[in-house]
């Protein structure tokens, strides 16, 4: 039996960012990425200006055949990027810089070349389309429901919420 006290459990909450990488790594590996670091930190790797016009799609590693000796050096991979059409030529000239930055981030010569695919980017941080203001009938009905509320700020908030809810229900039917 050991007389040393057990270490105490850490019972504090942890930031969500600690779990994102571990959750995304299996998904990233399906596209050839060893880890999700390139995907999560793309704008920090290439800079905001380039991140707005391109995004990584996958990493393609060279195929090692059965006749390849086991001690042969590992050839660098190809990074496939989705690029908005007008910026493909500029990014083609900046491909060596992108390779250097990705390799510097990963700490070894992982990427040897960049292959560009023109097309629209999938924007994940786009704002949703603006919501149309509620109609006058919904506003009047919501105001009628909140007549007994004494606090003016609370009544205004409830009126806005009620009017939007009533308008949304009418739009569904």
Image (cartoon, helix red, strand yellow):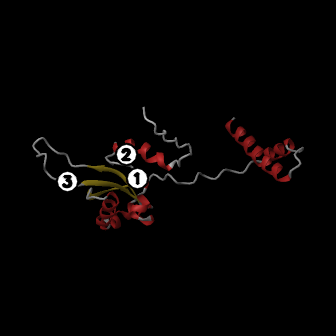
| Residue 152 in the figure: left or right of residue 82 | right
Q: Crowding at label 2, few (<14), some or many (≥20) Cα neighbours within 10 Å?
A: many
Could you tell me how far apart the alpha carbons at marks 3 and 2 are, in whole angstroms? Answer: 20 Å
Question: Is label 2 in a helix, a strand or a loop?
Answer: helix
Question: Is label 3 in a helix, a strand or a loop?
Answer: loop
Query: Residue lying farthest top?
Result: 1
Q: Position of residue 154 (x, y in %)?
A: 81, 49
Which numbered dot is residue 75? 3
Which numbered dot is residue 94? none
The quarter of the picture where the C terminus appears is top right
| Residue 162 in the figure: left or right of residue 44 | right
Residue that mark 2 sits on: 28
Residue that mark 1 sits on: 39
For residue 95, above or below residue 158: below
Q: Which is nearer the N-term, disc 2 or disc 1?
A: 2
Question: Is label 1 in a helix, a strand or a loop?
Answer: helix
**In the foreground, 11 or 31:** 11
Could you tell me how far apart the alpha carbons at marks 2 and 1 are, in whole angstroms? Answer: 8 Å
Q: Are marks 2 and 1 in contact (CB under 8 Å)?
A: yes
Q: Which is nearer the N-term, disc 3 or disc 2?
A: 2
Q: Residue at x 52, y 47 (%)?
A: 16
Q: Which is nearer the N-term, disc 1 or disc 3?
A: 1
């Amino acid at each position: 039996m050991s007389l040393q006290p057990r270490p105490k459990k850490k019972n504090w909450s942890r930031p969500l960012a600690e779990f994102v990488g571990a959750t995304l790594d299996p998904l990233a590996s399906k596209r050839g990425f060893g880890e999700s670091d390139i995907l999560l930190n793309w704008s920090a790797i290439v800079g905001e200006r380039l991140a707005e016009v391109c995004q990584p799609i996958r990493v393609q590693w060279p195929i090692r055949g059965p006749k390849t000796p086991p001690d042969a050096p590992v050839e660098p991979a190809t990074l496939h990027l989705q690029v908005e059409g007008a910026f493909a030529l500029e990014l083609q000239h900046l491909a060596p810089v992108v390779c250097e930055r990705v390799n510097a981030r990963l700490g070894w010569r992982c990427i040897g070349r960049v292959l560009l695919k023109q097309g629209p980017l999938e924007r994940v941080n786009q704002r949703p389309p603006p919501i149309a203001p509620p109609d006058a009938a919904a506003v009047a009905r919501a105001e009628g429901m909140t007549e007994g509320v004494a606090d003016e700020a609370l009544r205004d908030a409830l009126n806005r919420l009620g009017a939007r809810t009533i308008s949304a229900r009418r739009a569904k039917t």
